[in-house]
Image (cartoon, helix red, strand yellow):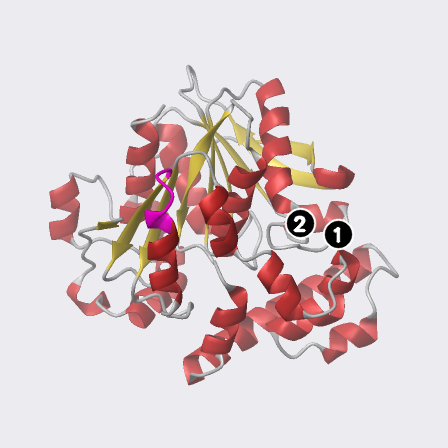
Amino acid sequence: MQQTVYTPPALLKNGLALTVYTALRSKKDWEKTIIDPPVSYQEAIFTGENGVPIYGLVAIPENPRGTIIGTYGVTGDLENQWYLRLLGRKAFGQSYAVVLFDWRGHGKTAELSPTLTSDGLYEGDDFVQIADQAKKRGCPAPFWFTGYSLGGQLALWGIKAALGNPDIGGGAVICPSLDSDRSLDYLNRSKFGRYLEKGITFELKKLAQKINEIHPGTMNPEAIKRVKSIRDFDHELVIKNLGFTSTREYYQACNGLTILPHLQKPILIIYALDDPLFDPSIVPDLQQVSAGNPQIELRLTEYGGHAGYISSKQCQRLYQDSDRWWAWNRVLDWYNQRS
């Protein structure tokens, strides 16, 4: 484990402030902050675990050095997840083939299939199958699995599923969700946490309603109405189809901390001590499990918020970065050392 030097601008030395700023302000002007031009993607339909169709975007530069496969967090889609698109531009600019995808129950993947999320239990295999099919499209190994927030947890499950696959190099994740059970309890202990969960729940309900409109009869409208929280969403719509009897049982099954000791490919985890979304009690457990697995490189930072990581000018100079996006720059530096 490394205690890593990272400093945000002076006014953003607060996890909540940096998280809100990144979510609300940076999404409006992120394209002006980088030198990399837009990427011309080709649409693709991959086949995931159990035959579930997965919508993705693929871009292959000349002489690619490897392939980065990534997805996003709990809500959103490829159209509005600018933070993932930011990675795509930077990675393509550094000669990586890029595959971005809407994971189960999201975006155009939800239009193709009513299959809902499993928080890694099946998405891990989706990552591996996407890599296999992307290779046939001309994307070269090594393949690197990437994500942030809940997408980071999915990428970790992908690395677990890639055991024995020589084409998978490993992966890097930013502020991954690791213990939903603890963190949902933690959110409900603060006004901001309850407000945030309410917003996520609203988006999840919209998603379920959309799926039921596109795939009539696949969702119980009364069950959707009963959803008042993230736990409710999983209880009413997710866990039964996965064979679980309670959300706690489900969250324990997909808990990212439990799989970290068993991962056998190189992994970079960037995690902020002031992340306002996750229970701080997770940090000592993350440190302990990372120390026990030499494949894991854990970089804890004092600041960063929830996948914010906007650098101060001084921090940019320290790392000789061309832009403010500290975490993605560290991810790409890490991949460059291995590709």
Residue 202 pos. (x, y %): 61, 72
Indicate which disc residue 226 carries.
none
Q: For mark 2, give the secondary structure.
A: loop
Residue lying furthest top: 63
Residue 318 pos. (x, y %): 12, 44
Residue 26 pos. (x, y %): 35, 57
Q: Which residue is drawn at 66% across and 46% down?
A: 122
Q: Mark 2 or mark 1, which is nearer the start of the sequence?
A: 2
Q: Identify residue for label 2.
A: 104
Identify which amino acid the numbered label 2 is placed on.
Answer: Arg
Asked if residue 304 is among those painted magenta in the image, a careful observer would answer no
172 in relation to 227, above or below: above
- Spatial separation of the CA atoms under disc 1 and disc 2: 6 Å
Q: In which quarter of the image is residue 285?
A: bottom left
> Could you tell me which quadrant the C terminus lies in?
top left
Residue 179 pos. (x, y %): 50, 63
Q: Identify residue for label 1.
A: 115
> Which sits in the foreground, 185 or 87?
185
Q: Quadrant of residue 136?
A: top right
Read off the magenta span. Answer: 290-295
Q: Decide: marks 1, 2 in contact (CB < 8 A)?
A: yes
Q: Which residue is drawn at 30% across and 71% down?
A: 17
